[in-house]
Image (spheres, grey):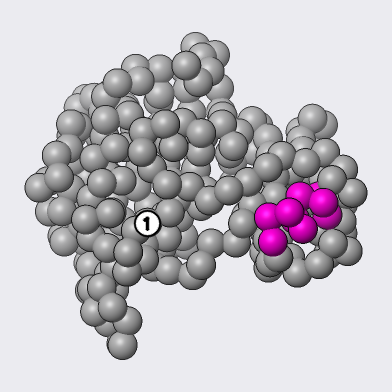
Amino acid sequence: MTTLLNELEAKELLASYGITTNAGQAVRSPAESADVAAKLGFPVAMKVLSDKISHKSDLGLVALNISSPDCARGAYDRIITAARAIDPEATAVVQTMAVPGREVIVGAKRDPQFGPIVLFGMGGVFVEVFKDVSIRVAPVDRQTAKEMIREIKGYKMLTEFRGQKSADIDALADVIVNISRLIMEREDIMELDANPVMAYESGAVAVDARVLLKNNNTIR
């Protein structure tokens, strides 16, 4: 049997391994959504918070660029109405809007043949469209992590490109190494991914995360 962590739990786990995430808080009503959004500072994002729903964007359970308390209340109502047809206990999370950056995915899973493996690629919708990823058997050190970054076809998009400065390759390598350490140390983790990770000129931030555990374990 497996357990899917909700997004806040998944991000808490990533943060415990040194991976930067954006701030967020669970909310349970339209009024609380508006209050938390104002506290975090507009614009904000809102997503369903559930341990039964993983593909939030595909189901229309994400609202971005919420710019006012009224918009926050309306987004909460829309998301909860749709989500509770799938999970009657679903709530929502309000998060700071990440500054736009280049989106990558860093993930890991337990392969039946090779054991823990780590992957890196262009993130967001690109991972499904282009399937442009590099894969290594864990553990992955910094040198190997940088090799993984350089070998994807989309690597040029992470370098100086059309007037943009290069993304912080060292920061991305750190995320890969920390994901590798996580899958190696936590034997209860079956799959995990941070997608997207926003890569910036300085630093990288995981703005969404998914973690699948076996045997009904929770964060230790």
Which residue in the structure is indicated by mark 1?
Answer: 204
- Magenta residues? 33-41
- Compared across the picture, whether 213 is left or right of 116 comes to right
The secondary structure that most of the magenta stretch takes on is helix
- Label 1 sits on a secondary structure element that is strand
Q: What residue lies at 23% left-to-right and 60% top-to-bottom?
A: 169
Q: Report if residue 150 lies within the magenta region.
A: no
| Whole-percent x, y for residue 173 in the image | 23, 50
| Whole-percent x, y for residue 82 in the image | 81, 48
Residue 81 seen in this snapshot:
no
Q: What residue lies at 43% left-to-right and 68% top-to-bottom?
A: 101
The answer to whether residue 134 is above or below residue 132 is above
Between 31 and 125, the one nearer to me in the picture: 31
The answer to whether residue 6 is above or below residue 3 is below
- Tell me the crowding category of disc 1: few under 14, some 14 to 19, or many 20 or more residues within 10 angstroms, Cα based: many
Q: Report if residue 39 lies within the magenta region.
A: yes
